[in-house]
Amino acid sequence: MVTVTFAGCGDAFGSGGRFQACIHLRPEMPEAPEAPGAPAALAGPVLLDCGATSLAALRRCGLDPGEIAAVFVSHLHGDHFGGLPFLILDGQFSRRAAPLAVVGPPGTRQRLAAAMECLFPGSTQVRRRFEVSVVELSPGRTEQVAGVTARAWQARHPSGAPALILRLAVGPTVVAYTGDTAWTPAVAEASHQADLLIAEAYYWDKAVPYHLRYADLAEHEITARRVMLTHMSADMLARQHLAVHDTARDGLVITV
């Protein structure tokens, strides 16, 4: 069982007064496996994306940033990864000791270092009590980080690096996430029979380059057991009551 908290589910521009993308997954924590070859134990809560407003969003929901074991980043736009420098420095100042993993597309390591130096010059050279590791996940590849198995597909969303559609296996629970993308068959493939698909629905039916419309989801077969819509513009927020699928809001908590 996984508790999903939509700490932030808004677009880049705060439509509807919402925080940027920051989705907190808290797995039920089993005892560490002892059998040889058993899956790695889950290390703790993880995030799907970490937009610039994420620290405030997490704290508003009563979630401790210091508990987060890993952040899975869909792409390298500020509203999806711009909160990472703040998350890392918050851990430094709160004397965090547990390691933090950042999993993102190729280019994440360089872009994160550049963002930290831009926002807080010298911050990449500071010695910390905890390790920050970066795992670069290419489309078509699978990685296991913090006990979570992540598989990536290529999204259609230019961001200076490949954008990812993600499928996370958190124990036996499967959560798929579109990030930002124009429609691609990879959305249906990545979410095939997933327990939850968290999908962008930027506009209702207006074609906006490199973004999903609700019409795209309605027109294609989605086999995920549950679909939750996020990253909604003012246009979509005004029509969300017409959607067949569930819609997220900041602070919403569901169990999968």
Image (spheres, helix red, strand yellow):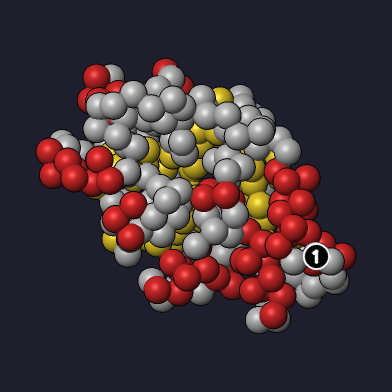
Is residue 42 something that shows in the picture?
no
Q: Quadrant of residue 226?
A: top left
Task: Decide which of 36, 207 is in the foreground and name it.
Answer: 207
Whole-percent x and y of residue 66? 59, 72
Q: Residue at x 55, y 33 (%)?
A: 164
Determine whether, in the image, residue 66 is placed left or right of residue 136: left
Placement of 17 over or under 73, stated as above or below: below
Q: Which residue is mark 1?
A: 121
Q: Residue at x 55, y 41 (%)?
A: 74
Task: Decide which of 44, 153 is in the foreground and name it.
Answer: 153
Determine whether, in the image, residue 197 is placed left or right of residue 119: left
Task: Decide which of 111, 195 is in the foreground and name it.
Answer: 111
* Total marks in image: 1
Element type at mark 1: loop
Whole-percent x and y of residue 59? 45, 74
Determine whether, in the image, residue 23 is placed left or right of residue 129: left
Going by the numbered disc 1, the residue's amino acid type is: Pro
Callout 1: 10 Å neighbours few (<14), some, many (20+)?
Answer: few
Whole-percent x and y of residue 247? 24, 47
Determine whether, in the image, residue 36 is placed left or right of residue 165: right
Extreme residue in the left direction:
242
Placement of 95 over or under 104, stated as above or below: below
Task: Decide which of 146, 183 is in the foreground and name it.
Answer: 183
Whole-percent x and y of residue 16? 29, 55
Is residue 251 something that shows in the picture?
yes
Q: Residue at x 62, y 66 (%)?
A: 87
Q: Residue at x 73, y 46 (%)?
A: 111
The N terminus - image quarter: bottom left
